[in-house]
Amino acid sequence: MNPTLTPELQLFRQELRDLLARPEVAAELAAIADVPPEECFPETVYQLLGAHQMLAPAWPRRYGGRDATAAHAAIVQEELSGHGIPDMPFINTITNAGALLLFVASAEQKARFLPPLAAGLGTMVVLYSEAEAGSDLASLRTRAERVDGGWRLYGSKWYAVQVRRAGYAVVAARTSDRGRAEAGITLFLVALDNPAVKASLVESLYPDPFYEVLLDGVHVPDCDVLGPVDGGWFVLAAGLAIERTGVDYNAKANSWLKTVAKQVEARDDAVLRDRLVSLQTQAAAGRVLAWRLVERQQEGDLNAEEAAMAKWFNSELCVKVAQLALDVGGPADATSVAMLREAPGLTLSAGGSEIMLEIIGSSLGLGGTS
């Protein structure tokens, strides 16, 4: 079952597909096919989409978008995955950091940061997670100390991706210890080329390298405080709900399923075919769930509980698809192994599956006390 698209959305999808069918797109994808994930950035593709205001279509025109809707942005995500275009820079920059800037940034900050991001000329990442905090952002230890004209940040962030390419990061830091832990968090826009910011590789099986980012007294001017001081928790709560519509995870699951289907079709194995059909059915259901969240986002009625359901269902679906790929292709198949390496990280990004289940359970009155 596919979401019903208006004629205007159908035209938008076709326009996007026409752009992605250009020879320069195929040439760049071929050129970066064997490039290490750390350096795998489809610059030509992103700038091509940016030049046609299609990289961030839901953003206002004055910032490089089309004044379009969340549905247009969802179509971009689906088509990037469907065409095998690396989407991590898009997710970090447009879906995560960019959406947060649109939501809470000052007019000056929006004018300064959004146009180059929408044009594909720069990338931005988010730095929330820490080694001892994980998905529990209320426990973060990175601190920001008030100084003349701004703040100095001290601490470290873990599990960050695409850091070496990004120009700026949205960093969550503690600015107050008074009251509830959630009430003392502030967001900052931090220049990653600052000498007081050091990124080091964290060994992992994930295909895209993880980094630890050390903030050793980096100065952030007042003009780069994002949102209200001590009000970052509430901004993050709204931003994470937008990240959890599930569109990106479902798009990846469907892209992987197309690859696995070709392998299954070459095998005379009824059990594998049954598993494939089951996962294709789940992917169709996950897409309906994700697009329902897109509709709610457009209506301004996106809630955390339904977003958690969509994120959990579709990210866990990726794990199931990766397992089928391994069972079909075996450990010697590079594509299957790449899926299996990436899938666990999808269940952790934007909040781990356990956190999603806790949110869902609490909404159903299933939470308990020990």
Image (cartoon, rainbow, N blue to C red):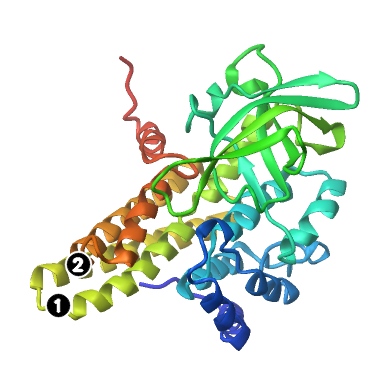
Q: Which residue sits at x=74%, y=43%? A: 104
Q: Number of numbered discs present?
A: 2
Q: As drawn, is 277 to the left or to the right of 129?
A: left
Task: Name the quarter where the N terminus is drawn.
Answer: bottom left
- Image quadrant assignment for residue 259: bottom left
Q: Callout 1, which amino acid?
A: Arg
Residue closest to the far right: 149
Report the front residue among 40 and 18.
40
Image coords of residue 93 (percent x, y): 65, 55
Q: Which residue sits at x=44%, y=54%? A: 207
Task: Name the quarter where the C terminus is drawn.
Answer: top left
**Tag 1's secondary structure?**
loop
- Look at mark 1 in the image and give the residue it sits on: 267
- Look at mark 2 in the image and give the residue it sits on: 328
Callout 2: few (<14), some (14-19), or many (20+) C-alpha neighbours within 10 Å? Answer: some
- Image quadrant assignment for residue 335: bottom left
Q: Which residue sits at x=83%, y=47%? A: 109
Report the front residue among 279 and 330.
330
